[in-house]
């Protein structure tokens, strides 16, 4: 299974915003509304991932904990 990143785009012609799952080397399709050129938007994602019980802090079991962030 291949994971594809989600990119946000805005059309240079009509301003329509859309999000697309694209491979890193994939060609960006035209705007679905007007056929114009889509421009990739910069997103601010600080971190992502998953935790497991093996990286527990001791006060939780590695689940969803509001005090330590696990």
Image (cartoon, helix red, strand yellow):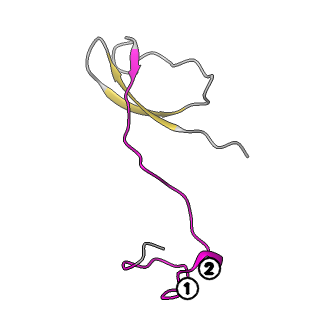
x and y, in percent, of residue 39 in the image: 39, 19
- Considering every residue shown, the one lying at the far front of the view is 57
The residue positioned 50% from the left and 18% from the top of the image is: 29
x and y, in percent, of residue 1 in the image: 73, 46
x and y, in percent, of residue 18 in the image: 37, 31
The quadrant in which residue 65 appears is bottom left
Crowding around mark 1 (Cα neighbors within 10 Å: few <14, some 14 to 19, many 20+) is some
Q: Which mark is residue 53?
A: 2
Q: Main secondary structure of the magenta part?
A: loop
The residue positioned 57% from the left and 17% from the top of the image is: 27
- Labels in figure, total: 2
Q: Are marks 1 and 2 in contact (CB under 8 Å)?
A: yes
The residue positioned 65% from the left and 78% from the top of the image is: 54
Compare marks 1 and 2 and give the one earlier in the sequence: 2
Q: Relative to 19, does residue 32 appear above or below in the rendering?
A: above
Residue 49: say if magenta.
yes
Residue 59: say if magenta.
yes
Crowding around mark 2 (Cα neighbors within 10 Å: few <14, some 14 to 19, many 20+) is few
Task: Answer left or right for 27 relative to 38.
Answer: right
Q: Relative to 54, does residue 30 appear above or below in the rendering?
A: above
From the viewer's side, name the closer residue of 55 and 45: 55
The residue positioned 37% from the left and 77% from the top of the image is: 66
Task: Answer left or right for 36 relative to 63.
Answer: left
Is disc 1 placed on a helix, strand or loop?
A: loop
Is disc 2 placed on a helix, strand or loop?
A: helix
x and y, in percent, of residue 6 in the image: 49, 38
Between the residue at mark 1 and the residue at mark 2, the CA separation in whole angstroms equals 5 Å
Q: What span is in magenta?
A: 38-67
Q: Which residue is mark 1?
A: 61
Q: Relative to 9, does residue 51 appear above or below in the rendering?
A: below
- Considering every residue shown, the one lying at the far right of the view is 1
């Amino acid at each position: 299974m291949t994971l594809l990143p989600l990119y946000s785009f805005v059309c240079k012609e009509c301003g329509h915003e859309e999000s697309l799952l694209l491979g890193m080397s994939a060609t960006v399709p035209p705007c679905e509304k007007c056929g114009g050129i889509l421009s990739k938007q910069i997103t601010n994602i600080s971190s992502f991932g998953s935790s497991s019980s093996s990286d527990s802090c001791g006060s939780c079991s590695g689940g969803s904990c509001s005090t330590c962030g696990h």
